[in-house]
Amino acid sequence: MAREILLKIEGLRIEGRAGDGWTEIVKGIDLTLHKGEVLGLIGESGAGKSTVGLAAMGFARDGCRITGGSIMFDGIDLRTAPEPQRRALRGARIAYVAQSAAASFNPAHKLIDQYCEAPVIHAVMDRARAEHDAIDLYRRMQLPNPEDIGFRYPHQVSGGQLQRAMTAMAMACRPDLIIFDEPTTALDVTTQIEVLAAIRDIVRQFDTAAIYITHDLAVVAQAADRIKVLLRGQEVEEAPTRTMLAAPREDYTRSLWAVRSFARPEQPPPTDAPILSVRNVTAAYGKVAVLEDVSFDIHPGRTIAIVGESGSGKSTAARVITGLLPPKSGAVLFEGKPLPPALKGRKRDQLRQVQMIYQMADTALNPKLRLRELIGRPAQMYLGLEGKALETRVRDLLDLIELDPDTYIDRLPGELSGGQKQRIGIARALAAEPKVIICDEVTSALDQIVQEGILKLLTRLQDEFRLAYMFITHDLATVRAIADDVVVMQKGRVIEQGPKARMFTPPHEPYTELLLSSVPEMDPDWLTRLLDRRAALPG
């Protein structure tokens, strides 16, 4: 029996502010969603996925306006309905799960207080019943200590736990529709499996319809009944998930399927001395040990990938290398000589030699500075460039990262796409002329097409300047594409390390095998098989 239509969008048009005028960013999209059905929305950055998802709630973010079409939710036109009626639906019958749970929760309130807010305000249940319901949903979401975890603040739980708590919070009023906006993008592979399985189970248990927005095709294959592909605000094609995966009709869709074809040519074993060495480092935050006897080498012209779950110590190792966290024991050597353990003890040239590119370019770039200042400051500070020499250097760096200097040099970060911002982060690191660059999850928030462009750029720059990269990532597809050597970390310790070819060839350490088995495949049955296989394991 055909399911009843819950949401029907016809001819949706949305404009975004551009300078003093407006430009159309969603161009006549149609969308039909039945009760209990999951629709995957995919496409590269700027395709309009999140804008369409928000419009399904009758909402347009700041700087956008809905200019055409109808948005019918269970017989209610959300375009023309009075704002109080739309507000009454949001949170109660339509819920939203954001990409970054850490940025979405109020840090000043406990999880359970934030859970209870919507059902109490919408008069779905009283506070006591809402608390009891929260604990029940925390248990269904397989959160640890469900009776107690709600009484923690957001910063007291992990990213994966917070994402599951947000999904539980979205279910508080038992909505008919949930918009999932990239809910697993920034999570490591094992945590992603937990969150994805929890999302799939909770949607099925309550027969909730969902729009699942993502750029990760393998992830959406596990959750969606149908997939719609968008490009620059227009539909490319739509089909049931199995049909789409087996035989996409359009060239653009096939290009999405094949985008991870890039791989850096395999390099011969290193013959020169390491440019940077971490030697038997143990470190702690206060009394809490976070690294224990960690050692690895980084060679000129090579990339070492540091992989592991959240909390494994990857970023902490980077903090030790850069002097932000002095180790309790052990040392960091640069060109064979120990670096002062603390940042303030390092000379300017020592600081210059090791630079970082950060995960979130949005927060790493000062929004008030133009690109000439953002890129120019390291060149001023470390190389003493001024005037025309500085201008020339900034323009050369923009050329290096494949952005036209005349077009971009006076832009602000807010005028750039996500991929362009990350390129500016790369240029800023290069401005100091370092020998080592630490790349901290630099592609995790980018769609797969943009990711590939960034990886190709980093590889070209590495070959041109013989840079050494330390690549912190949870994305094993990125490791396969760019790494020469791999270090696997768990709970602050190095579990195993070696050349990439050996690390990806069985037999593996049990923890490495867990990481490798958690990488989603382009198969709708992959998650079910994985969970069944793990459930059958002893213990």
Image (cartoon, rainbow, N blue to C red):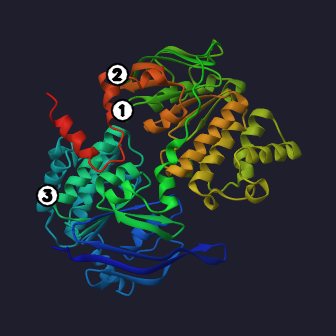
- What percent of the width, then of the height, locates residue 260? 50, 44
Residue 434, position as x, y percentages in the image: 69, 30
Categorize mark 3 by other alpha carbons within 10 Å: few (<14), some (14-19), many (20+). some
- In three-dimensional space, the C-alpha distance between marks 3 and 1, rounded to whole angstroms, equals 36 Å
Residue at image coords 88%, 46%: 388
Q: Viewer-nearest of labels 3 and 2?
A: 2
Dot 3 amino acid type? Asp
Residue at (48, 62) in percent of width and height: 250
Callout 2 amino acid:
His
Which badge, 3 or 2, is on the more N-terminal residue?
3
Task: Name the residue located 69 percent from the left edge and 45 percent from the top edge.
Answer: 401
Residue 516, disc: 1
Name the quadrant containing residue 9. bottom left
Q: Quadrant of residue 128?
A: bottom left
Give residue 437's position: percent from left, percent from top: 62, 31
507 over 533 or under it: above or below: above
Whether pointer 1 and pointer 2 mark residues with C-beta atoms closer than 8 Å, the reply is yes
The x and y percentages for residue 234 are 50, 71
Contact between marks 3 and 2 (CB within 8 A): the answer is: no
Label located before the other in sequence (3 or 1): 3
Task: Provide the residue designation for mark 3.
Answer: 133
**Residue highlighted by disc 2:** 508
Determine whether the residue tagged by mark 3 lies in a helix, strand or loop: helix
Q: Is residue 110 visible?
A: no
Which label belongs to residue 437? none
Label 1 packing within 10 angstroms: few (<14), some (14-19), many (20+)? some
